[in-house]
Structure formats: structure tokens, C-alpha cells
């Protein structure tokens, strides 16, 4: 939560710095000559604040190795583990049961993996959809991990 707050503060600083810098830059050329140096100094400070805000946002909002998975990522990992447990071939119902997600969620996630080229779809003689994960099925054309 702290990283998110610092990231938001960084975004706000960046926005303020990069919005105010052009304002002061335009004022530097419309004000009397005596204030040009002060306005240009303010522009420099605002650009510095903007860059510091970008850095603060970047370091606090980006994902890091070892960060906990999002709920969607964790569900996908459970689904892939379920597919591995079933020898790389899994139905929607088995995926939902083993990954502890709803049938609708399993259907959508498996369909998404199919669209990404991660899984192929086969129909059984009874018309049931079976998702085949070539990276998991032994001897199915992809190297075993």
C-alpha cells in the first residue's frame, strides 16, 4: 500500500512539474527583463520536480521480481498447474475444479490461452472441448520444461 501511495505522489509531482514548467517558461518571455532569470530558475526547478516525480512513480509502481501475483495471475498459474496434473489435457470443468475458479472464469481463461497460442482445442467424440497444452504434453511437439 505504501508503494502505491508513493507512486501516486510521484505521478502528481511529475504532472505538477511538467505542467508548471511551460507556464513559467512562457512568463519568462512576457515579463519584464528583471524577472527572466527568476522565471528560468523556476522552470529548472519545476523540471527537476517533474523528473523526480517520474522516478518516484517508476520505482514504486513497477512490478518487481518476487512481488506477489495478482489474483488473475494466481488463477492462471493454478489453471496451468491443473493442466500439468492432467497430462497437459484438460476440460473446462476439470480446470474450474482444480484451479478453484468458476466454470465461466475457467472457460474465459482457457479461451484466452487458446487465443494466445498457448493451448489448442480439441473436440471429443461426445463434443466436449479439451484444451491441449503442447508445452506440457510429453511428445506433443514442444520441449519439456
Image: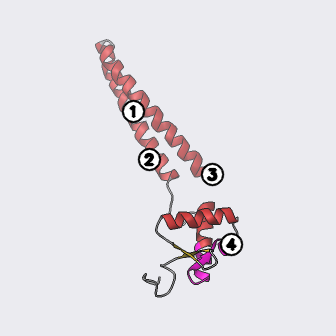
- Dot 1 falls on a residue whose secondary structure is helix
Residue 19 appears in view: yes
Q: In this figure, which residue is indicated by the disc labeled 2?
A: 55
Residue stretch in magenta: 80-96
- Relative side of 46 to 73, left or right: left
- Relative side of 49 to 76, left or right: left
Distance CA(mark 3)–CA(mark 1):
29 Å
The residue located at (67%, 75%) in the rendering is 94
Q: In this figure, which residue is indicated by the disc labeled 4?
A: 93
Q: Are marks 2 and 3 in contact (CB under 8 Å)?
A: no
Q: Can you give x and y, in whole percent of width and height, for residue 89 in the image?
A: 57, 80
Q: Residues within 10 Å of mark 4 (few under 14, many from 20)?
A: some
Say if 55 sits above or below 103 in the image: above
Distance CA(mark 2)–CA(mark 3):
18 Å
Q: In this figure, which residue is indicated by the disc labeled 3?
A: 1
Please name which of the two marks, 2 or 1, marks the residue nearer to the observer: 2
Task: Kindly indicate the quadrant of the structure image that contains residue 22.
Answer: top left
Indicate which disc, 2 or 3, sits on the residue closer to the N terminus: 3
Q: In this figure, which residue is indicated by the disc labeled 1?
A: 45
Say if 64 sits above or below 36 in the image: below
Amino acid at each position: 500500500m505504501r508503494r502505491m501511495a508513493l507512486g501516486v505522489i510521484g505521478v502528481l509531482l511529475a504532472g505538477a512539474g511538467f505542467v508548471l514548467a511551460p507556464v513559467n517558461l512562457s512568463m519568462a518571455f512576457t515579463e519584464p527583463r528583471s524577472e527572466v532569470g527568476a522565471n528560468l530558475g523556476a522552470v529548472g526547478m519545476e523540471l527537476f520536480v517533474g523528473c523526480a516525480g517520474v522516478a518516484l512513480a517508476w520505482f514504486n509502481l513497477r512490478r518487481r521480481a518476487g512481488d506477489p501475483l495478482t489474483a488473475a495471475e494466481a488463477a492462471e498459474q493454478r489453471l496451468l498447474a491443473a493442466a500439468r496434473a492432467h497430462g497437459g489435457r484438460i476440460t473446462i470443468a476439470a480446470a474450474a475444479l482444480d484451479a478453484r475458479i468458476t466454470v465461466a472464469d475457467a472457460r474465459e481463461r482457457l479461451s484466452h490461452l487458446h487465443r494466445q497460442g498457448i493451448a489448442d482445442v480439441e473436440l471429443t467424440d461426445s463434443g466436449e472441448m479439451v484444451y491441449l497444452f503442447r508445452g506440457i504434453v510429453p511428445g506433443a511437439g514442444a520441449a519439456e520444461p
